[in-house]
Image: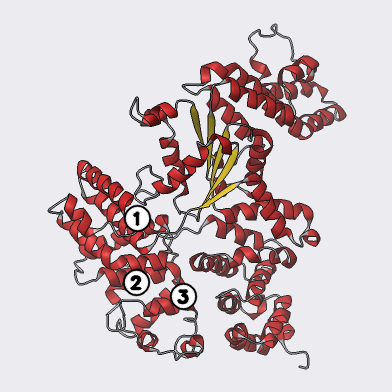
Amino acid sequence: MWADNETTTDLLGFSIHTDLVRSVILEPGLLPVTIGVYGDWGGGKTSVLKMLQRDLNPEEHAEGSPEHTSLQRVACLYFNGWLFEGYDDAKSALLSSILVELGEHKRFGPKIRDKALQLIKSVNWMRVARLGLKEVALPALLATATGGASLLPSVVANLAGFVGLGNKEKPKEEGATLEWDDLFGEKAKAEGSADVRTFREDFAKLIADSDIDTLVILIDDLDRCSPQRIVDNLEAIKLFLSVDKTAFVIGADPRIVRHAVRTVYGQAAGSSELEGYADLVTEYLEKVIQVPYYLPWLSPSEVETYISLLFCQQHLQPAQYTDVCTVFTQHRAQDRYSVFGLAAIKQVINPLPQPLAESLAFTSEASALLTEGLKGNPRQVKRFLNALMLRQKLAAVAQMNHLKDEVLVKLMLLEYAHPKQYKELYEWQSQHKGQPPQLQKLETLEVPAGEDADALVRPIAETWTGTRLRRWVTMEPRLADIDLRDYYWISRDRLSSTFSGVAMIPPLVRRLFASMAKQDTALNEKLLPEARQLTDVERGALFDLFSSHLRQQPGDLKVFDALVLLTQHRLPDAATTLKEAIEVAGSKNVPASVGVRLRSIIQAGGEEAEVLRSTVEKLQASDSRAGRASRPKNQ
């Protein structure tokens, strides 16, 4: 089993990305700069940032080496943006954290600690200014109006501690109370307050006085934050911190960042003012992030190499594993395209332990299948392997030695990407002693050029339409002649739940669903570009959320409306999800307005109309409000 954590051990060949980002950071003529390390959820962003942090630390290089010497005046700070999620003011939390880290820096801290402390007071005063009405003025007004003016000193005292005035070296005399002037008087303001321009000037002077040539600030997990916190952090970088000699590197899924900007400023603008808003979002991000860099999906050869090294990590002694990684690094420097697999590893460790040899042989056969099913996502690959190993161990305990790994992998890919069809296949095979005729017909189905594959598939299995399922059916190995009962037996624990052991729903999908589930149709139309950019797996996860929600709340109008909207705009598999949602909800729970829009879909014709036709006809035959609304106007 493997931990689902970031690592500085490069099993993906991602050092090339780290080296590229580092070369931009260390080019003085390019500073200040903000770099976006972009990638999907689980795509390796955190590992790249951790490797960058390691490579920019002079102590990680041999003393006296060129790297050790050149990095002496480089300061690299790492922050997890998610840690600021609970703060009332994320901007101030980020600014304060950076200043604290600088003040405590081993090489630069002693020289700038006092100035950093003064800037922290400035940050706290800016925070007070933003919170003053809510946290001070209103409580004070309320206290006075209700005759509780005696509460005011305690309010002021709490706020004084907040801005750092409660810890002065000279304490007040016993029994004395903190006066308002101590907190907001001219002397206090002179000591601590600053506007944006002044703060930027003071921060730039702090950097100049510190002997730092390059200040690198790595911000990770920004895409886990709420939309407001994402925007707050971006604004802190742009307004306060983007000064000479600074480089920010932000690891995030760009689609989530776009979603955050659109959500925060779109809600402020209102749906009537959002025309052309996609261009404004793009321009906003281009002003904040000057250098966007996208991490690619892993190719089949890279997936095979990655899995091979994971198995080496599991089966080899630490010294042997280190030797393999060293040779792999040399191999990548000379050849970035070929697989570093069984043959190459055998040249380093010979003979191979039997379990490792078997695992590497499996990797060679299954890597193409895994790449196709998991879209080259490193996190999904690791989670999938963990789930696979549990199944293999269960098969061994149950003495099912006849089970083939490639068959198990193919079935697990169906379980991961198409849980609904996975359960349907379970019903088929249980009715036909493990060898369902429906699967045999699907595997042998020939689709002549120019023919509609879905039209040929639907009479065999109505819900097995779409290119993704067709691709799964035709990939090797074929399953029609295999008894599937034992394979389903070892996975029976998953049949009543989602495939959460392997596939967590990506944050982007959760946020997109949450937005669409509470907004009106006009605002949801602005989210269509994001929905269209989802991968097949992400889109499947989105529709699973729709289905799950409507099973629990079958009459939720906004969720139904969002699903109808996606169907009207022909998002793949939306019509099938809508059809099943209507059938599960029951005619009496379908809102009447949904019936009206279903009538429009049927009248428009096309693939969506064919998918929904039989369900809509049943709805029309009912005496429900949606049934009556869905009938043609002449009925």
Of marks 1 and 2, which one's residue comes earlier in the chain?
1
Which numbered circle lies on residue 83?
A: none
Q: Mark 1 points at which residue?
A: 336
Closer mark to the observer between disc 1 and disc 2: 1
Alpha carbon distance from label 1 to label 2: 28 Å
Q: Name the residue under label 3.
A: 468
Closer to us: 193 or 629? 193
Specify few, some or many for label 2: CA neighbours under 10 Å numbering under 14, 14-19, or 20 or more.
many
The residue that appears at 60% across and 84% down in the rendered structure is 612
Marks 2,3: beta carbons within 8 A: no
Residue 580, how many percent across, how many down? 56, 77
Q: Name the residue under label 2.
A: 410
Specify few, some or many for label 1: CA neighbours under 10 Å numbering under 14, 14-19, or 20 or more.
few
- Quarter location, residue 63: top left
- Quarter location, residue 432: bottom left
Secondary structure under tag 2 reads: helix
Colour pattern of the rendering: secondary structure
Alpha carbon distance from label 2 to label 3: 13 Å
Alpha carbon distance from label 3 to label 1: 29 Å
In the image, residue 4 sits, relative to residue 365, either above or below, namely above
Is residue 228 in view from this perspective? no
